[in-house]
């Protein structure tokens, strides 16, 4: 069973990405991660590291703390 925090975090990534009207592929490119990685995060299939949270936050042009506003 997937952990609630992974689902909430994945939803937050998707929400912020869609606000900016960018694809998973575009976000992955900006963040320097593989294109399938973003989808796996959004579907709560990966337990993301702090380093990758930082990369994604920078790619979305937001503070890392905003990524955790679902808590």
Image: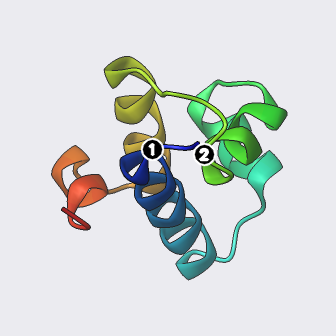
Badge 2 marks a residue whose secondary structure is loop
Q: Quadrant of residue 57?
A: top left
Q: Quadrant of residue 68?
A: bottom left
Position of the C terminus, as image quadrant, is bottom left
Q: Which mark is residue 44?
A: 2
Q: Which mark is residue 21?
A: none
Q: Is residue 50 left or right of residue 48?
A: left
Distance, label 1 to label 2, CA atoms, is 8 Å
Q: Position of residue 23 (x, y in %)?
A: 78, 61
- In the orientation shown, which residue stands out farthest toward the front? 1
Give the colour scheme of this rendering. Answer: rainbow
Q: Residue at x 63, y 25 (%)?
A: 32
Q: Residue at x 41, y 53 (%)?
A: 4
Q: Is residue 40 left or right of residue 4?
A: right
Vertical order, 68 against 46 (above or below): below
Disc nearer the start of the sequence (1/2): 1
Vertical order, 14 against 18 (above or below): above
Vertical order, 10 against 48 (above or below): below
For disc 1, the marked residue is 3
Look at the numbered discs 1 and 2 and tell me whether their residues touch, using CB distance below 8 Å: yes
Front residue of 3/11: it is 3
Q: Residue at x 42, y 60 (%)?
A: 8
Q: Position of residue 14 (x, y in %)?
A: 59, 65
Position of the N terminus, as image quadrant, is top right
Front residue of 19/30: it is 19
Q: Is residue 70 left or right of residue 39?
A: left
């Amino acid at each position: 069973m997937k952990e609630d925090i992974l689902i909430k975090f994945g939803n937050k990534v998707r929400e912020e990405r869609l606000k900016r009207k960018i694809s998973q592929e575009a976000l992955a490119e900006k963040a320097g991660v593989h294109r399938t990685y973003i989808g796996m995060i959004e579907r709560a299939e990966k337990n993301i590291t702090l380093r990758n949270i930082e990369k994604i936050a920078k790619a979305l042009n937001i503070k890392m703390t905003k990524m955790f506003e679902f808590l």
